[in-house]
Image (cartoon, helix red, strand yellow):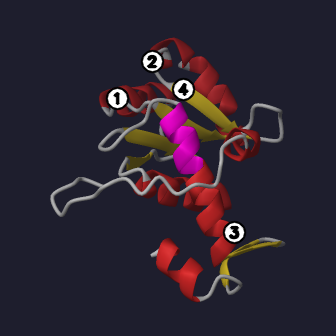
């Protein structure tokens, strides 16, 4: 869907979040960068990508980026207790877990349970989500998809 709208109406607003606005072109580029970042972290078709935060622009970018890679977005309810979050993320075998800054203490409390999962915080640090995303090219991975795929 993002690919189609980016081609048809690249400068039309796709997402408005607070004071921020992304066009379809920008959302397409950002989601492609996210897909490339996920691929660089070892995520492939059918793999799970967990997300824990309140609704955000990053969530939309992550979900479309995962879809472009044919990976499966796995949202985690932010109201859960740390052990419950750990069970969901480890049971899903999520290779990447994107977490809002507000929930960093929760993730720190279960860090030992997440040893096999790359955690990316949505914050302004040099290794935060935007830097992680923007370090990658905006090339759409064009992962093959079939009707029976989970994603």
Pointers 2 and 1 in contact (C-beta within 8 Å): yes
Q: Which residue is mark 4?
A: 118
Q: Which residue is mark 3?
A: 26
Q: Nearer the viewer, residue 107 or 15?
A: 15
How far apart are labels 2 and 4 at the CA level?
A: 7 Å
Magenta stretch in the rendered image: 34-40
Q: Which residue is mark 2?
A: 116
How far apart are labels 4 and 1 at the CA level?
A: 11 Å
Q: Earlier in the sequence, mark 3 or mark 4?
A: 3
Dot 1: what SS? loop
Report the residue that reaches farthest toward the top. 112
Dot 2: what SS? loop
Q: Nearer the viewer, mark 3 or mark 4?
A: 3
How far apart are labels 2 and 1 at the CA level?
A: 8 Å
Q: Nearer the viewer, residue 135 or 18?
A: 135
Does the magenta segment cover residue 128?
Answer: no
Tell me if 34 is positioned left or right of 4 in this view.
Answer: right
């Amino acid at each position: 869907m993002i690919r189609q709208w980016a081609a048809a109406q690249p400068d039309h607003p796709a997402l408005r979040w607070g004071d921020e606005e992304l066009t379809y072109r920008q959302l397409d580029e950002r989601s492609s960068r996210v897909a490339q970042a996920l691929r660089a972290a070892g995520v492939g078709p059918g793999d799970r990508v967990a997300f824990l935060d309140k609704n955000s622009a990053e969530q939309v970018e992550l979900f479309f980026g995962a879809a472009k890679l044919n990976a499966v977005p796995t949202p985690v309810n932010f109201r859960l207790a740390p052990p419950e979050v750990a069970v969901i993320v480890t049971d899903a075998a999520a290779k990447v877990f994107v977490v809002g800054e507000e929930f960093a203490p929760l993730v720190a409390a279960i860090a030992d349970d997440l040893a096999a999962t790359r955690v990316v915080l949505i914050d302004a640090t040099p290794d935060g989500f935007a830097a992680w995303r923007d370090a990658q090219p905006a090339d759409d991975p064009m992962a093959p998809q079939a009707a029976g795929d989970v994603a």
